[in-house]
Image (cartoon, grey):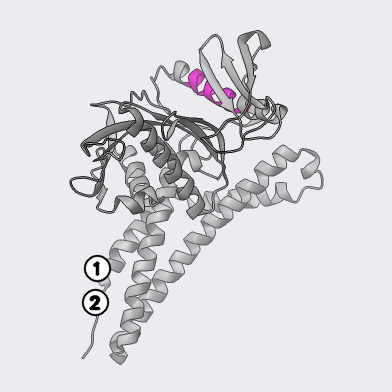
Amino acid sequence: MLEIDLSDQIRALRATFGDIRAVVDVDQLVADIAALNEQAGASDLWDNAENAQKVTSSLSHKQAQLATINRIARSLDDLEVLVEMANEAGDEDAAAEAKNELEGIQKVLGELEIQTLLNGEYDPRAAVITIRAGAGGVDAADFAEMLLRMYLRYAEKHGFPVQVLDTSYAEEAGIKSATIEVDAPYAFGTLSVEAGTHRLVRMSPFNSAGKRQTSFAAVEVVPLMEETESIEIPENDIRVDVFRSSGPGGQSVNTTDSAVRITHLPTGTVVSCQNEKSQIQNRAAAMRVLQSRLLLIKREEENATKKELAGNITASWGDQMRSYVLAPYQMVKDLRTEYEVNNPSNVFDGDLDGFIAAGIRWRKTPAQ
């Protein structure tokens, strides 16, 4: 007679679910939704469009979170009934359905658990990611471009709006640097664990002798600040340079000086933007990124925490947080969390969920 026993797994899921409910504070969540609903129903809500956007966005996020919690509660109850029915009837199809349902709940619970860990001050913000080629010559520039594509594909897979703000191309191949903006809720909290030095080991396609080459790239992730939080930047503190947007050989370029580079003289911070068609749009986008970086510097000074969010990234030996090995074997391994996979091509195609989840959990452990 067919009989499946999922009692231990269900008991573990209920324990995890109980912990998540406690962290989320469901009663407070319901109260917050009620308060936001009242604000959203106010007749003068859209008199202040920026505040209205905050209210509706927060309401949507909290409603989705509550809906997920309620759905998991129902699914756990349904799973127990399904297991009981499968055992009573000796139904193999029902048993297979129960196991699939169990796996589905485990996946949703894992995602919800990660969300509850994103409770930092800036975690809900959009993210600005800057990738820079490090040690390794042309291989490093090529690696930096591989990472750029990886993050663009990650955003695409998740339906996150993303735009390339600036790209500086290397002479032979790849890029010197690139900056992208991922405009999605909790993008910074999620992607901030990607900050650090990334290392690539492979048989170099740029080496005629076909020797194995090690190269490095640095990834910086900062939260995108809202305009209401913008730091006042005196005109005397910045130098604005305009130039023509450029691309790799053969690619069409602008015929006007629309690209903008802003240098913040007191700190030496440099931001470029050439994605937009007009100089005015590029300047506005560059100023927004500059303000985000200056606010980050201000936070670091106030907390006396060196590179708390962006990290002190040298992009060289002894500082790597993740290794991508393509030869003599295939592996991608995060050196902080010990999480690894044996399919680098999937990772470079944007399959980062496992690394990000492990990184978020690692960041929240007491030792960190």
Report the disc number at residue 128: none
Task: Please state which amino acid type lies under the numbered disc 1.
Answer: Asp
Report which residue position mark 1 lands on: 8
Q: On the picture, is 363 further left or further right than 327?
A: right
Above or below residue 219? Residue 110 is below
Q: CA distance from mark 2 to mark 1?
A: 8 Å
Report which residue position mark 2 lands on: 5
**Residue 296 location (% of width, % of height):** 50, 23
User: Which element type, helix, strand or loop, lies under badge 1?
Assistant: helix
Above or below residue 297? Residue 117 is below
**Residue 203 location (% of width, % of height):** 24, 41
Magenta range: 288-299
Determine if the magenta segment contains residue 41: no
Residue 367 visible in the shown view: no
Kindly report the secondary structure that dominates the magenta region of the rendered protein.
helix
**Residue 293 location (% of width, % of height):** 52, 24
Determine if the magenta segment contains residue 292: yes
Quadrant containing the N terminus is: bottom left
Mark 2 crowd level (few <14, some 14–19, many ≥20, 10 Å Cα)? few
Q: On the picture, is 78 further left or further right than 270?
A: left
Q: Quadrant of residue 163?
A: top right
**Residue 316 location (% of width, % of height):** 29, 25
Residue 86 visible in the shown view: yes
Q: On the picture, is 33 further left or further right than 249?
A: right
Task: Please state which amino acid type lies under the numbered disc 2.
Answer: Asp
Residue shown at the point (38%, 19%) measured from the top left = 306
**Do tag 2 and tag 1 residues touch (Cβ < 8 Å)?**
yes
